[in-house]
């Protein structure tokens, strides 16, 4: 029997967590031989609902789930965490400007970064999901000076999976047959879904789709998919975000298969000319618990322009909270 790992989740009674936690506790993220302890964190107003969720988790009698602990603060919630999934964030409310949202979240992720630094396992792997996810990951990482920035990441696997799904639908193949799509940049409407490396059933995707459809329909559709879902459901994506979290953490912990490329927002080391220090989504490959940016991919002029545009948005986000960074 493996030693149990401790997984901390914030925003633990929200919509994404309701889809995530039961699957995670059943072993879908780290394997069906990996026992785990869940440390669930919520704001104090949501603790009653979180306690109810913990009762339901208990009632599943899941063989891998060794303990469920609930907290109303990140300092206790992150204590000893091997994995931290930061879903909770301040949502945008009426009248709130983007900068207000960035500032409100900066305070949340500053505290969480400090708590990770001081209380989590020194090897903790952190995934930020709460929006604006890339910049929240930057804030958390900058507030955790004892942790390597590469221990922090932000979720763009949702965009990656959306791209696979939409390409598959257009070509009439299964999503599994579509490989090596790349999301560059921010988890926002400036992200760049890049199909230059993508293959469907072993054949180049770009040779099978019309360039005008790709540039003028598919890219905007992926960029706007989150908003489309909010309009349709009245809520942000939940089950698909949970799936993306499972995929992201699974690949980080257990490795990507067959040299596949996946998309993750990670600390930029300057690869592909991207501004160092931003949390930017890159093509990644993971082995033995370590993810690396896939190097050496050729970039078209179209790709370079799109990558720059999303980088500029991330630089503007950073500039608006720069005074709050240590
Ligand atoms: C999504 O991509 O579905 C969400 O990040 C959208 C949102 O703003 O909550």
Image: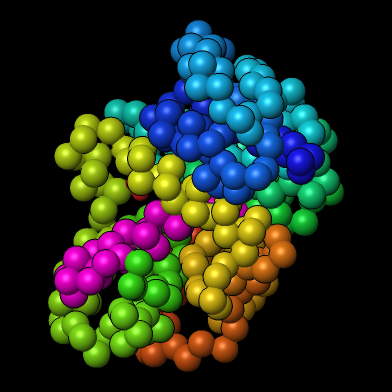
Q: Is residue 183 above or below residue 99?
A: below
| x 55%, y 78%: residue | 259
Q: Which secondary structure class fits the magenta region best?
A: helix
Count of picture labels = 0
Query: 127 or 54, which is in the foreground?
Result: 54
| x 71%, y 54%: residue | 151
Residue 127 drawn at (x, y percent): 59, 47
**Residue 275 makes an appearance in the image:** no
Q: Quadrant of the N terminus?
A: top right
Query: 311 or 6, which is in the foreground?
Result: 6
| x 65%, y 55%: residue | 253
Q: Is residue 40 above or below residue 72?
A: below
Q: Is residue 303 above or below residue 124?
A: below
- What's the coloring here? rainbow
- Quadrant location, ligand no. 1: top left
Residue 28 drawn at (x, y percent): 52, 45
193 sits to left or right of 57:
left
Q: Is residue 125 above or below residue 156?
A: above
Is 226 a magenta residue? no
Residue 226 drawn at (x, y percent): 30, 48
Give the magenta range.
153-175
**Residue 237 makes an appearance in the image:** yes
| x 24%, y 44%: residue | 229
Query: 62 or 163, which is in the foreground?
Result: 62
Query: 136 or 322, which is in the foreground?
Result: 136
Quarter of image, res 319: bottom right
Residue 79 drawn at (x, y percent): 77, 30
């Amino acid at each position: 029997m493996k030693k149990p790992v401790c997984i901390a989740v914030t925003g633990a009674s929200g919509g994404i967590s309701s889809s995530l936690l039961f699957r995670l506790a059943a072993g879908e993220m780290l394997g069906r031989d990996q026992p785990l302890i869940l440390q669930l964190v919520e704001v104090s107003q949501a603790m009653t609902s979180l306690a109810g969720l913990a009762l339901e988790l208990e009632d599943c009698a899941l063989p891998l789930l060794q303990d469920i602990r609930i907290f109303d603060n990140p300092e206790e919630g992150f204590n000893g965490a091997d994995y931290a999934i930061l879903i909770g964030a301040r949502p945008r409310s009426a009248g709130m400007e983007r900068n207000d949202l960035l500032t409100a979240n900066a305070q949340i992720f500053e505290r969480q970064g400090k708590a990770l630094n001081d209380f989590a396992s020194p090897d903790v792997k952190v995934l930020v999901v709460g929006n604006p996810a890339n910049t929240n990951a930057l804030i958390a990482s900058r507030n955790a000076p004892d942790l390597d920035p590469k221990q922090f990441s932000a979720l763009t696997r949702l965009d990656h999976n959306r791209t696979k799904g939409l390409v598959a639908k257009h070509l009439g193949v299964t999503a599994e047959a579509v490989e090596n799509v790349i999301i560059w940049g921010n988890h926002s409407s400036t992200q760049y879904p890049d199909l230059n490396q993508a293959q469907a059933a072993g054949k180049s995707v770009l040779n099978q789709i019309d360039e005008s459809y790709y540039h003028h329909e598919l890219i905007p559709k992926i960029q706007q998919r989150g908003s489309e879902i909010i309009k349709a459901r009245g809520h942000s994506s939940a089950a698909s975000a949970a799936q993306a979290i499972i995929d992201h953490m699974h690949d980080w912990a257990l490795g990507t298969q067959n040299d596949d490329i996946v998309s993750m927002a990670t600390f930029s080391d300057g690869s592909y000319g991207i501004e160092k220090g931003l949390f930017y989504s890159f093509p990644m490959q993971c082995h033995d618990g370590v993810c690396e940016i896939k190097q050496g991919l050729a970039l078209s002029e179209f790709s370079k322009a799109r990558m720059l545009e999303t980088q500029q948005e991330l630089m503007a986000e950073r500039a608006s909270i720069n005074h709050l960074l240590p």
